[in-house]
Amino acid sequence: MYQERIRNKKLLDKIMSAEQAAAMIKDGMNIGTSGFTPSGYPKAVPLALAKRVQETGEKLKINLLTGASVGDELDGALARAGVVHKRLPYQTSNEMRKALNDPNGVQYQDQHLSHTPQQVRYGYFGDIDFAIVEACAITEDGHIVPTTSLGNSPTFVKVAKKVIVELNTSQPLELEGMHDVYIPHDPPNREPIPITKAGQRIGTPYIECNPEKIAAIVVTDIPDNVRPLAPLDDESRAMAKNLIGFLKKEVEAGRLPQNLLPLQSGVGSVANAVLAGLLESDFTDLEFYSEVIQDSALDLIDAGKFKVCSGTSLTPSAEGLKRFYANIENYKKTIILRPQEISNNPEVARRLGVISMNTAIEVDIYGHVNSTHIMGTRMMNGIGGSGDFTRNAYLSIFTTASTAKNGEISSIVPMCSHIDHTEHDVNVIVTEIGVADLRNKSPRERALEIINNCAHPDFRPMLLDYYERALKTLGKQAHTPHLLKEALSWHQRFIETGSMKIK
Amino acid sequence: MYQERIRNKKLLDKIMSAEQAAAMIKDGMNIGTSGFTPSGYPKAVPLALAKRVQETGEKLKINLLTGASVGDELDGALARAGVVHKRLPYQTSNEMRKALNDPNGVQYQDQHLSHTPQQVRYGYFGDIDFAIVEACAITEDGHIVPTTSLGNSPTFVKVAKKVIVELNTSQPLELEGMHDVYIPHDPPNREPIPITKAGQRIGTPYIECNPEKIAAIVVTDIPDNVRPLAPLDDESRAMAKNLIGFLKKEVEAGRLPQNLLPLQSGVGSVANAVLAGLLESDFTDLEFYSEVIQDSALDLIDAGKFKVCSGTSLTPSAEGLKRFYANIENYKKTIILRPQEISNNPEVARRLGVISMNTAIEVDIYGHVNSTHIMGTRMMNGIGGSGDFTRNAYLSIFTTASTAKNGEISSIVPMCSHIDHTEHDVNVIVTEIGVADLRNKSPRERALEIINNCAHPDFRPMLLDYYERALKTLGKQAHTPHLLKEALSWHQRFIETGSMKIK
């Protein structure tokens, strides 16, 4: 059965067990794997590696580069086994998060997802010893047909000294033809990326690979460890309603076409609610130029609303995956999976005029956004692709509920405790309370817009009080009024009392 | 004499005095002008407008959009007259700075310089009532031949309801042919910007203009109010030496070609020292893909080291300008002036693989950079093009002296009081002390790299103490160790005592 998926028959010799393949991985190696969201990542080999180290007590540390987040069989297992020295560019694993926040744990580099592959090629991380890539099939020429994500696999396979293929028979062969693999040349020889429409194909349906480089083929059938979708709550619905209402007004004002511009959407409950809201809206002929394709995107395809659905990863829920598999040939007409260097490419995002919609952890009154850190010090997940899109968007939008932790935290703060997106890049803030349009506004104008339109009433008077006292104290030195003694005091109060409120 | 410069003879009718042209400017108008650095900006009309308001006491406020900074005849005169309501996207004027830091003064939007022109076309600032553009000449078809900068003039002329041309006879006609004007289409119809080499020309040598839109031609001979160059000091020389030494090592490591990659350089004494250092170095066949062309670039052209010199503005010192005029036909072979949307374009910067070199006001121990604000609240100049280049660079470098104010301020701080460039974008920090290479490092690794290699010895123990106490206090919640109570205390101490040192 699986033999049919290895069309280059010489490579049948390379089939071995996960344990045998994992045995090739040595201390100090740089390992680049497939995977973007818990989708299309290798499973059997990392599990075998973790088991080996846990059983033998062997001293082994690797540097782990992926597309983005991966499933527990990779990040979780390796973090638990304590074998990861460096990790980049993104993660969402509980175990990995614990390890990277521990100074004796993992050294984590939180990167723009479009930066990683070119910096790998530029040599900024040293040589890649092994690429470990999940595949549906291997072609006659030894090229690799990827599975449910593309991520950084094309670059890892290109530069790695050796390649381990995890041939995953749980992934349907019909995925073949959905991918569009393109690796730009590096400067000084780079050419324009020739995408001018969100649905355009510019590459090959496989990852080019010299079969000589394939050191092992491991056959497995462990399925993608997809996450269940959180049900939509009222807060997310309210944010979605505010956001879609804002887009409608932009169309009415003539600043956006009737069918909008290609949409990028982060993941999570607000993103799902926004896409669900678009499903119910009057918008038609929409295009999606994003990273992650989830159930809500399938809904929009089914309803005929998404003409194009371009991403780097397909991560529906278990139910969504069934629906996708049942109708895969039809979805293939609309869905394109690209390398993250292309799905997230600044050049393409700016050219297409993407409308970016991402989630903030907190926003300050001048429009800076924190996407990554809790109370300034603890890493949540990472910036992911939000910066790639935000900086280059036609219109950049951030959503956040106005409060967190049962209302004890205000997501609108005097000063962000960590900044991932600066005032120069953020156009619009949406909370369940309302919309702040930051365009064509100075910092002082933005402060009032954000406080009045987006802050929770419990915190609005405190924010106004901060702003007004800062303004008064600074006199004529106040382009961006702040009281440095107090700017981070809301976070400090939360650390000390469990609430940002003054009780 | 000047009549020869107006080759469309029908337009001779439009010649009027600066006062007559200024009389067309009314309260509430959006005015977009030429000018980038004190070069190529209109002078006679703004002076006349300021005079009119000061003499009549008329109530008039305009919104002023330029390319970037402009000379005193524009920013200074209008700020003194109190006629500016909004100002964007950049300035360096003492008078304007005073006004925008005053809450009763000017509302300033500090923008990425590549963002402004497309956002003007997207309608984010409303209609542009007048474009006021300095010109060398007007062609037979009514098109405008710009002078020493291009900035946002092409877009302003394209979208403005009416155009006022300041025909400046102090600007030599030989400037014609130096410009390369290209305006991208807007989404969803934008095509790739076809530049693949720093020296490539893709546009027209003039700004396209419908002659019907020309409402006035004002003839003037006020020269560009260029700034004298500060002499190189030892600190700047030390930074330049460190930076060039780092580039040499990158070449040796095989991560950069022998002739580097196209260089972008900010302005100021360190930038001048770096370019002076390149002049003395072994590097040859260099390319410059930057914003501002100053004396040091002319030196590198004269020495045959710059094969290509692309920017949006030509701002030598008074002496440099003489040298340029004396040999203009020769310089024209190497120099190209582009609209700032192209000189600073993320697509092009990333494709060419620009090495960006910009100046920081302060840097924190995790690699965030403040380019704009003094003590978190007072605007200095603005972000300018530093973000356009930094985010998209092959290698992004920031320089700063390790201390300021006679050693009382450490430019390396626990946490920046304002952040313009995040940890995700900054590759290398250079001070006169040394070089911190932040690539392939986690925040904790970066902290030690920056403190040990770049901080001044007077502040190094304090920084280490902060970092170590943060690490200890946070335990296993320390991806980015900070003590929020202390993070901004160095700035607060400076405000209160005039020194960041504990005395």
Image (cartoon, coloured by chain):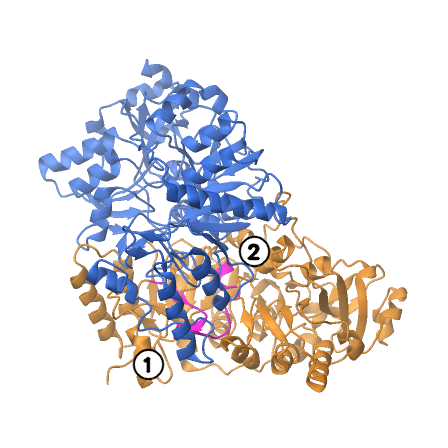
Chain colours: A blue, B orange
- What residue is disc 1 on? B494
Q: Which residues are magenta?
A: B367-388
Asked whether residue B408 appears in the rendered view, the answer is no
Q: Are marks 1 and 2 on the same chain?
A: yes
Q: Is residue A230 above or below residue B120?
A: above
The secondary structure type at the circle numbered 2 is: loop
Q: Residues within 10 Å of mark 2 (few under 14, many from 20)?
A: many
x then y, percent, for residue A89: 34, 47
Chain ID for label 2?
B
Question: How many marks overall?
Answer: 2
C-alpha span from label 1 to label 2: 38 Å
Residue at screen point 46% across, 29% down? A299
Asked whether residue A50 appears in the rendered view, the answer is yes
Is residue B375 part of the magenta span, yes or no?
yes
Q: Which of the pair A93/B81 is nearer the observer?
A: B81
Q: Which of the pair A286/A251 is nearer the observer?
A: A251
Name the image quarter holding residue A457. Answer: bottom left
- What residue is disc 2 on? B345
x then y, percent, for residue A475: 44, 80
Extreme residue in the top direction? A1
Residue at screen point 35% across, 66% down? A462
Extreme residue in the left direction? A56
| Circle nearer the N terminus (1, 2) | 2
